[in-house]
Image (tube, helix red, strand yellow):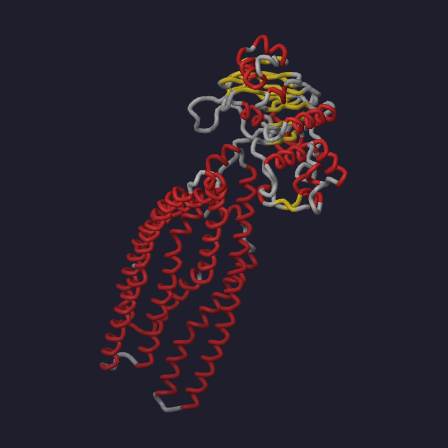
Amino acid sequence: MKIICSRVKLKAIQLIGFISLVLLSAVGQMLLPSFLAQMISHGVATGANHVVWIYAAIMAAITIVSCIISLLSVKLASYISTDFAAQLRDQVFSKVQSFSAAEMDKFGTASLITRSTSDITNVQNFLTLLLRVGLLAPMMAAAGLVFSAATGGKVSSVLLVAIPVLLVVLTVIMVLASRFSIRLRKKLDQINRLFLESLEGVRVIRAFNKQKAESKRFENVNADYAMTAMTAGRITSLLMPAISVIFGVTTAAVLGMGTYYVSTGAMEVASLVANSQYISMVLTSVMMLSLVIMMFPTSYACAKRIAEVLKTESSIRDGSFPLDRRPMRATVEFRHVTFAYPGADEPILKDVSFISHPGEITAIIGGTGRGKSSILKLIPRLYDPMFGEVLIDGINAKEYHTKDLRSLIGYVPQKNVLFSGDIADNLNFGKEDGTENDWKRAAKLACADEFICKKPRGYHDPIAQGGTNLSGGQRQRMAIARAIIKRPEIYVFDDSFSALDMKTDRQLRQNLKETIGDATVIMVAQRVSTIMDADRILVVDDGQIVGNDTHEQLLKTCPLYREIAEIQLGKEAL
């Protein structure tokens, strides 16, 4: 909670106002038993009915005022906790946005979703209960003990046994419940991860008729979560019966001792009634506090998981080199770069070196899983290399602020991601103030205008979440158009032409070649026909560059490239 409270600031004036309301409410409730004792002593015992009515009116007024104050305090508590959760959610979202791909891999998508939704909601509910009950109950209990000792004498000594027993029971139950709460949150992550996988892969599941297998897998995880939840529930369910037993025994002991002292004349009936009211108030306050204690283990586990996100620093640190002092433009160079993904047994890239100049197209080809996409991820600093340097315009990429660095790059990832909204909104991801002319130019260059023009609302036609209302080729062309509208100095295409037919592929490459100007293009491709006209082709095998030349020269000097070309184009064509 320390980390969370240091990031989220509550307004002092709201807290002061809330505490004042709680104090007034506590004072009002404390006065009622005292006035009840006065009513019995000066009204009931003497038969003075007018005194009884006066005290009844006073008690009714105090009750009404206390209710109004309580209503205001509850409303303010809800506002404070809601504002706290909103700020915390913003903090978590901003922190996640700053994460590199390494931190995203560490936490996982499902876990981050759980932490930013369910976990924050649990903390919010706990804070609401803490403000409404956690502050009032201790005040009521402390005041009740003082007034009970003042009015009850020896009868109040019952609390010296009851309260320690109650505290021991609460502590034991809380410690046991907290262990299961942490396990429960982790198992909830597993459920969310499996559910997310099932939603994203629903078409594959149906295509392979794996609905029953996936349902069985979910049932197993769900059953495991249910068993843990039931165990935690059994432990916390012991709390209320234990409190009820202690409450009942204490009340019986107070009334028994009080009756004896009243019969011997050592205590007045009015004092006994007031004292029993104060003792009931103390025990009720402890019972109310137990509700907070019951929620504490789960809330603590949630807060710990949220704090873990907030205190995690991105492995990508910003530099401070200004863009206007770059010695070159649109130049990418790798110098003896070695890179491994977090937790990997061995590097995926080993001593990679090449340079791409302005106006050139550098293509990368090779077998599956050989490190082609990994090269591209290092350019916008989605990851940083273990050894070596990635130079952008002659300066180590680490020297730039990441926002400045990425402003130079138009990146089209291997998995094309579109966002809910319309076509124009998605294109403006590349240029926030893009106009309709910008949209049309980018769409035309990306060969996306042919299907956009057929849409009922054109560039304002809606896009579903993830672009599911578009085909794979349409999503790919939209992603390319989004990069083109940015007019970057460096284009990075990660296998961005694989879903295009040969005609569209050729037309799109021709459009790029005619319009990139002094920009440099670095692309990963699977088809030799896509990269034949590139100024430079890098052949990657087992994380190393085994060929670096033009198409014609590689056919003569690189056996691996010639083998790929022969398989795709045929020996006769070569």
Residue 550 percent coordinates (x, y)? 63, 13
Do we see residue 295 in this rendering? Answer: yes
Dividing the picture into quadrants, the one containing residue 326 is top right
Query: In the figure, is residue 506 to the left or right of 204?
Result: right
Q: Residue at x 63, y 11 (%)?
A: 552
Q: Is residue 443 above or below residue 510?
A: below
Residue 505 percent coordinates (x, y)? 65, 27
Residue 479 percent coordinates (x, y)? 63, 35
Query: In the figure, is residue 488 to the left or right of 257?
Result: right
Q: Residue at x 54, y 28 (%)?
A: 383
Q: Is residue 170 above or below residue 458?
A: below
- So how many labels did they put on this image? 0
**Most foreground residue, 68 or 513:** 513
**Most foreground residue, 237 or 178:** 237
Do we see residue 386 in this rendering? Answer: no
Q: Residue at x 67, y 42 (%)?
A: 423
Furthest toward the right, the residue is 437
Furthest toward the top, the residue is 556
Dividing the picture into quadrants, the one containing residue 53 is bottom left
Residue 429 percent coordinates (x, y)? 66, 39
Quarter holding the C terminus? top right
Query: In the figure, is residue 46 to the left or right of 27?
Result: left
**Most foreground residue, 5 or 34:** 5
**Most foreground residue, 153 or 404:** 404
